[in-house]
Amino acid sequence: QVQLVESGGGLVQAGGSLRLSCAASGRSFSTYVMAWFRQAPGNEREFVAYINWSSDRTYYADSVKGRFTISRDNAKNTVYLQMNSLKPEDTAVYYCAAGLRGSYYYTRRTSYDYWGQGTQVTVSS
């Protein structure tokens, strides 16, 4: 099965930055659509950002637009989430997701086939 491993989480002060990475196994990473979701305690897992296979389509949740940037390096089988101007409400476990094909419903968890185990991001105030 495809394996996704997130890294780069940690504790930062409000206004700071973090860069998350998601390393994928498998032979067909370049064909996957990729996304980041996050889940805070007691909350639903929510969509954060999306990127297609060729990096010419990206979409963001309104809550992170202008602060977060998703990117991918297909040669390294890795997708990134650069998070700037972090706020305490960004505190959550961040999950990487991969889809074997695109979907109109790219913000929905059910549109993705593989998930990482998550990395904790904590923003202090």
Image (cartoon, rainbow, N blue to C red):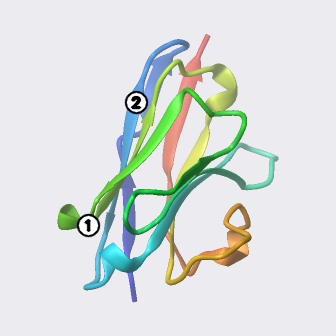
Q: Quadrant of the N terminus?
A: bottom left
Q: Which residue matches tag 2?
A: 18
Q: Choose between 34 and 17: the one closer to the eye.
A: 34
Query: Where is residue 73 drawn, in percent x and y?
Result: 26, 57
Q: Choose between 79 and 87: the one closer to the eye.
A: 79
Whether residue 96 is visible to the viewer of this picture, yes or no, is no
Query: Where is residue 122 drawn, in percent x and y?
Result: 55, 29
Residue type at the position of mark 1 = Asn
Q: Find residue 77 and name its label.
A: 1
Outermost residue toward the bottom in this view: 1
Number of other residues with Cα within 10 Å of mark 2, as a class: few under 14, some 14 to 19, many 20 or more: some
Query: Where is residue 34 drawn, in percent x and y?
Result: 48, 65
Q: Quadrant of the C terminus?
A: top right
Residue at point 39%, 58% (across, down): 55
Query: As displayed, is residue 118 above or below residue 17?
Result: below
Residue type at the position of mark 2 = Leu
Q: In the structure shown, which secondary structural element does the residue marked by tag 1 occupy?
A: loop
Outermost residue toward the front in this view: 56
Whether residue 52 sits left or right of residue 14 in the image: it is left
Mark 2 or 1: the one toward you: 1
Q: Choose between 50 and 45: the one closer to the eye.
A: 50
Marks 1 and 2: in contact by CB < 8 Å?
Answer: no
Query: As displayed, is residue 44 above or below residue 12?
Result: below
Residue 124: quadrant of the picture = top right
Whether residue 123 sits left or right of residue 83 in the image: it is right
Whether residue 44 sits left or right of residue 7 in the image: it is right
Residue at point 33%, 55% (across, down): 72
- N-term mark: 2 or 1: 2
Q: In the structure shown, which secondary structural element does the residue marked by tag 2 occupy?
A: strand
Residue at point 54%, 82% (across, down): 101
Query: Where is residue 20 drawn, in percent x and y?
Result: 39, 43
Number of other residues with Cα within 10 Å of mark 1, as a class: few under 14, some 14 to 19, many 20 or more: some
